[in-house]
Amino acid sequence: MRAIFILVLFFGISYGQTVQIDLPQKKLDLFTSYYNSFLKSINTEIKKLTSLEQPANKLSDPKNLSALISRYDKLLKKVATEKLIILTKYQEYSDSAVETLSNLGVSAEKIKEISSILKKAKDKLAESFDHLEDFLFYKKKELTFLKNSKFSVNKDRIIFSTKQDYNQYKKIITQAVQHLKEFNQYSDQFLKLHKKAVKKINELF
């Protein structure tokens, strides 16, 4: 039976307090704008691709499968590129915030604490991207598996000719769903750490 993917990704991230210093604020605004724009575009693209997979009988056409595989591959490459850009922008914000605090005479202990939180936030952000890439990889793998397998479609259900194919297909889509779930989890952890860091920075002013 064809699995139903969880496709309502928890995007729409909004940031609460922000640092009231020009340089870090500008870096934060650049990151926030770019990141939210990316999340919105990736969510739209995944929903669009998912709609192209429905109903299941569309997947019985090799041309449709090839087109979907190509689009997932393109999206996967886009995410890999955007990952580097977004992580760089967050690092620039972190460096700017720490440098400004240092110039204002904030204690080394406080700066070390905030730096640690910002680093943990960036690590969670990177891990969220890793899982997003893995999700797209397994979606591509799923469609490639279908393209190379023998199956039929009955009442919007994919029916494989062998139990082995069914089990292998089920394993692939289970991996895809798991990575999507973990992408959401790590994104949420990133947001919590980020807000914690921003709050501690604001408390110094």
Image (tube, rainbow, N blue to C red):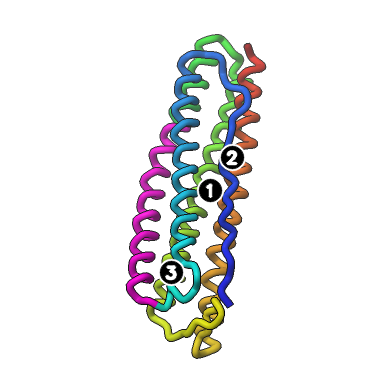
Q: Position of residue 125 (x, y in %)?
A: 53, 42
Measuring 50% from the left and 45% from the top, which residue is drawn there? 126
Q: Position of residue 76 (x, y in %)?
A: 39, 55
Residue matched to label 1: 128
For the magenta stretch, what is the residue range?
61-90
| Residue 148 colored in magenta in the image | no
Q: Indicate the amino acid at tag 2.
A: Phe
Could you tell me which secondary element the residue under label 1 belongs to? helix
How many labels sit on residues? 3
What is the chief secondary structure element of the magenta stretch? helix
**Residue 141: mark:** 3
Q: Indicate the amino acid at tag 3.
A: Lys
Q: Nearer the viewer, mark 3 or mark 1?
A: 3
**Residue 190: mark:** 2
In the rendered image, the quadrant that contains the C terminus is top right
Classify mark 2: residues with Cα within 10 Å, few (<14), some (14-19) or many (20+).
many
Q: Nearer the viewer, mark 2 or mark 3?
A: 3
Q: Is residue 128 above or below residue 28?
A: below
